[in-house]
Each structure stands twice: as C-alpha cells, then as structure tokens.
Image (cartoon, rainbow, N blue to C red):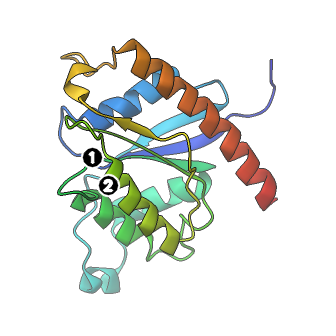
C-alpha cells in the first residue's frame, strides 16, 4: 500500500447540460479512479463570455477561483463534448479566460482528456482540437490511451451512471495510466 499523497486532479466538463454524458463521465471517474488520484469536478458555468473590456475591469471571481484550483492541482482532466466537429464554446471560453491569468495556470500542467457523445466517433475531433489549443498554452496532454465514448446513450443509465462493463473497465485502465503519466510528468518537472 502506497503512502504517497494522491495527485490532486481538477476535472472540467465542457457541457453545462444537467444530463450531460461528459459530466456523467467525470462522475464515473470519481468512482473508478485509483487511490492515487483525488479528483474534484470544478464548475465553469459562472464564467462569463470572454470580453477584454471585462478583463480590463478585473478578472471575474469564478475565473480567479478556478485558476487558483488549477494552479494548486497536479493535473487537469477535461471531458469534452463535440459540437460541430470541435470543442464546445463554453469550454473554449473558460480556457480563453484561464489563458489570460498571470501566471497562466495551465502552463506545464499535465492534461488528460476524455469525451462522450451519442455518435459513433465519440468526441475524437473535439479532443484533437483541444490538443491544438493546449499546445499554445504549453499544457502537455497525455497521448494515449484515448477515451472516445461513442453511443453514450447506450452506456449510461437514466440516472447518468456509466453501466457498460467494457467502457467502465477501459476508463478505469485509462485513469490508472493517467495516474502513472502525471507521476512521470511531475518527476520530469522536478
């Protein structure tokens, strides 16, 4: 049994919908995570649309609180839907705001990304776009394994619980790989 303090992970869902499969996937992460990950789901719903005039008057309090959580965390786990082959605006907006904080909290922060959708491809295109955004922010994303939960409506029950056995196993394995990858990333940064 390890006596190491678990890695603190801030998890962000790119969907604000009450019945979001991506938020449900993050709740499954809470259940399936190995002991070495302490996951907290953060809320991005109170972050206003990015506006330079608003920024000039001061950063919104919900953004500063999120930035502080991310700065204090060991890594970030994104769960992104796919809207029109890309990242949803609400997630991009949160990242755009975060990128303006100084110091920028995503800089060199290990990143994991997953996604669920009703389509067969899961959220593959959105995740590739998210990777491009993160390159600019110098936030290293784990390359594999990748989690694209397709046909999500068949893998979650009406209460939003991930019930598909194969998907649960694969996601648990992903989270174990993420724990190992965060450990390696932090060791390299030390």
Q: Position of residue 179 (x, y in %)?
A: 65, 37
Residues under labels 1 and 2: Cα distance? 7 Å
Classed neighbour count for the residue bearing mark 2: other residues with Cα under 10 Å, few (<14), some (14–19), many (≥20): many
Vertical order, 23 against 160 (above or below):
below
Secondary structure at badge 1 equals: loop
Residue toward you, 121 or 82: 121
Residue 98: name its quadrant: bottom left
Question: Horizontal placement of 88 versus 74: left or right?
Answer: left
Q: In the image, 77: left or right of 150?
A: right
Task: Give percent across and percent down for residue 23.
Answer: 31, 36
Look at the numbered discs 1 and 2 and tell me whether their residues touch, using CB distance below 8 Å. yes
The quarter of the rendered structure image containing the N terminus is: top right
Label 1: how many Cα within 10 Å (few below 14, some 14–19, many 20+): many
Residue 65 visible? The answer is no
Q: Which callout, 1 or 2, points to the residue nearer the camera? A: 2
Residue 141 visible somewhere in the drawing: yes
- Which quadrant: the C terminus? bottom right
Answer with the quarter of the image where residue 95 lies: bottom left
The picture places residue 91, in percent across and down from the top left corner, at 31, 58
Q: Secondary structure at mark 2?
A: helix
Image: 187 above or below 107? above
**Count of all numbered marks drawn on residues in the image:** 2
Residue 81's disc number: 1
Residue 105: x percent and y percent? 54, 65
Residue lying at 61% horizontally and 41% vertically, measured from the top left: 8
Return the residue at label 2.
Answer: 126
**Residue occupying the far front of the picture:** 120
Among numbered discs 1 and 2, the one appearing first in the sequence: 1
Residue at 25%, 22% (x, y): give it.
160
């Amino acid at each position: 049994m390890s006596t190491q303090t678990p890695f603190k992970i801030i998890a962000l869902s790119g969907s604000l919908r009450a019945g979001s499969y991506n938020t449900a996937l993050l709740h499954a992460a809470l259940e399936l995570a190995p002991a070495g990950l302490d996951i907290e789901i953060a809320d991005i719903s109170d972050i206003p649309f990015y506006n330079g005039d608003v920024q000039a008057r001061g950063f919104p309090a919900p953004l500063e609180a999120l930035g502080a959580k991310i700065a204090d965390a060991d890594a970030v786990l994104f769960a992104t839907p796919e809207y029109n082959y890309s990242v949803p605006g609400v997630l991009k907006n949160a990242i755009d705001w975060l990128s303006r904080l100084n110091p920028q909290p995503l800089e060199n922060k290990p990143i994991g990304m997953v996604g669920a959708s009703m389509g067969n491809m899961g959220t593959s295109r959105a995740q590739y776009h998210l990777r491009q955004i993160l390159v600019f922010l110098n936030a290293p994303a784990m390359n594999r394994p990748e989690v694209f939960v397709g046909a999500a409506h068949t893998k979650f029950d009406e209460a939003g619980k991930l019930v598909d056995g194969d998907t649960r196993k694969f996601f648990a394995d992903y989270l174990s790989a993420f724990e190992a990858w965060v450990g390696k990333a932090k060791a390299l940064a030390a």
